[in-house]
């Protein structure tokens, strides 16, 4: 076995997560300040080594990492891409399986000296190749957001129609026509009203009805088509 390992040395194997949320009407990503070298003191994505004796697969590894470093679980997550090479980590040849997670703001920790949310368009210098991983996550979200209910997963289980439109606008980076957006929602039967629930708007005005996704938000054949 030792001869085999000497002949075929193993690369560093990790998982990393692009955790995106909506906060104060802005798309933000959760970052951790690294406590040790390499890149000690720099901000980076939540991640960690794959533990062979504990993680059944990379999905198990990212679930463990997110519980340990983000303090949450049970949210939407998908595998994003694999990043690898001899120069991305100064410790040696490395491979990272990156994931993207969409999490409502109230399920994430509050900002501290070591854990903080940053606007995706105002990131600090990041460790390793994490800037490229964040960029890949944003490209995935914005690409899928135009034809799926994916942006709704940033809101939690219930929301107003205004909340939902704002989520799409933030993700897509453009203003949507309200009448067209709501008409398309009705045509596709993507949302349903939550009976007996109301959320009052700030200031004067009628109470806003509260809605939820009508079917499983993980299903990507539910589209808004040209409305967005």
Image: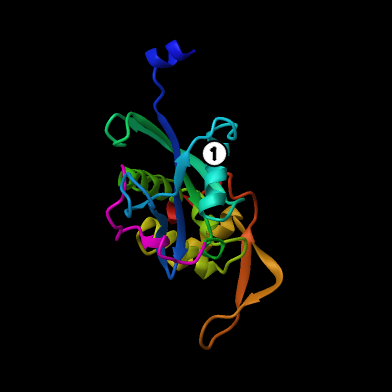
- 172 falls in the magenta region: no
Q: Which residue is mark 1?
A: 61
Q: Residue at x 35, y 31 (%)?
A: 84
Left of 172 or right of it: where is 70? Answer: right
Q: Main secondary structure of the magenta part?
A: loop
Which quarter of the figure is the C terminus placed in? bottom left
Q: Secondary structure at mark 1?
A: helix
Name the spot of residue 179 as percent of width and height, x first.
47, 67
Q: Residue 220 placed where, x, y %?
A: 54, 44
Q: Nearer the viewer, residue 146 or 74?
A: 74
Residue at horizontal 30 percent and vertical 51 percent from the top:
126
- The residue carrying pointer 1 sits among few (fewer than 14), some (14 to 19) or many (20 or more) residues within 10 Å by Cα, namely many
Task: Report the residue that reaches farthest toward the front.
Answer: 2
Horizontal and vertical percent position of residue 94: 36, 31
The boundaries of the magenta stretch are 109-128
Q: Is residue 220 visible?
A: no
Left or right of residue 167: residue 71: right
- Determine the residue located farthest toward the right in the rendered image: 196
């Amino acid at each position: 076995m030792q001869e085999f390992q000497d002949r075929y040395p193993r690369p560093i194997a990790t998982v990393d997560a692009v955790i995106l949320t909506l906060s104060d009407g802005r798309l933000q990503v959760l970052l951790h300040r690294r406590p040790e070298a390499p890149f000690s003191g720099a901000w980076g994505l939540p991640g960690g080594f794959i533990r062979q004796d504990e993680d059944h697969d990379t999905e198990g590894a990212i679930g463990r990492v997110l519980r340990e470093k983000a303090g949450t679980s049970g949210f939407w997550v998908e595998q994003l891409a694999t990043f690898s090479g001899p120069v991305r980590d100064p410790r040696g040849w490395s491979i990272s399986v990156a994931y993207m997670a969409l999490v409502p703001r109230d399920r994430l920790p509050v900002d501290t000296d070591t854990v903080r949310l940053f606007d995706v368009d105002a990131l600090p210098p990041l460790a390793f190749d994490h800037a490229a991983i964040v960029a890949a996550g944003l490209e995935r979200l914005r690409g899928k957001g135009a034809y799926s209910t994916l942006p709704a997963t940033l809101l939690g289980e219930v929301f107003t129609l205004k909340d939902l439109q704002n989520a799409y606008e933030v993700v897509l980076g453009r203003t949507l026509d309200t009448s067209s957006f709501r008409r398309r929602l009705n045509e596709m039967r993507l949302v349903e009203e939550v009976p007996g629930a109301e959320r009052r708007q700030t200031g004067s005005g009628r109470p806003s009805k509260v809605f939820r996704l009508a079917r499983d938000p993980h299903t990507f054949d539910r589209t808004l088509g040209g409305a967005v």
